[in-house]
Amino acid sequence: MRGKNTLLHPWRIPGILLNRLTWPVPFGLWLVNMIHQRVLRINAGVPFMVHFTSQVWGDIIPGKDVWRSFAFSGNCYIQGYNRIVIGDDTIFAPGVRIISANHELDREISGDRDELASGPGIVIGKRVWIGANAVILPGVRIGDHAIIAAGAVVTRDVPAYAVVGGVPAGILRYREFMPENSIEN
């Protein structure tokens, strides 16, 4: 008989307790993320949990509950050289690339140093959805409640409630207005 009755399966009790302790991240993922970040010092400078297959560095300001996407979404590259501000409740899928700085185009190449250009950072609004393998390039501002389709390359600003996709990303349509007290909250 398969059931959730732990009295019949007492060996499941430690796993259930550990998962409750580390909720919403399952204990196994929590443990691997912590070993990579705190013991192996990969993404050690980041003050929130990062998935063990992701690279995150620079000046990143996440909003409320954005840390969940950092913990769950693997194979992401978030480069905050020129600052990245992410609004509350924004979620992103695996493989997302958010790149806030590019290389200097008109400078001499010196083989020993790789200089990044300073410029405006990236601002991502509240409750934005960013699909798998999407790329957001330097200086972009994304409005609240926007959706970035999987595989999109965002090279210019995205208005609020817009759904964008493609390479380069263009507006596909607009979402219907959702009041602040809607189910989406």
Image (cartoon, grey):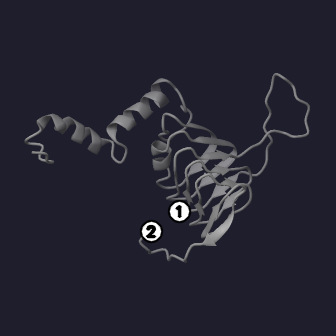
In this picture, residue 126 sits left or right of residue 58: left
Q: Residues within 10 Å of mark 1 (few under 14, many from 20)?
A: many
Q: Are marks 1 and 2 in contact (CB under 8 Å)?
A: yes
The quadrant of the image that shows the N terminus is top left
Q: Name the secondary structure under disc 2.
A: loop
Disc number placed over residue 13 in the picture, else none: none
Which amino acid does the dot numbered 1 rest on? Arg
Q: Which residue is mark 2?
A: 184
Residue in the picture at 59% in, 66% down: 144
Residue in the picture at 53% in, 57% down: 90
**Real-space CA distance between mark 1 and mark 2, rounded to the nearest whole angstrom:** 9 Å
Q: Which residue is mark 1?
A: 127
Q: Position of residue 121 (x, y in %)?
A: 71, 51
Residue in the picture at 84% in, 23% down: 111
Which amino acid does the dot numbered 2 rest on? Glu
Q: How many marks?
A: 2
Q: Is residue 183 above or below residue 10?
A: below
Q: Name the secondary structure under disc 1.
A: loop
Q: Position of residue 100 (x, y in %)?
A: 70, 46
Residue in the picture at 63% in, 71% down: 173
The quadrant of the image that shows the C terminus is bottom left
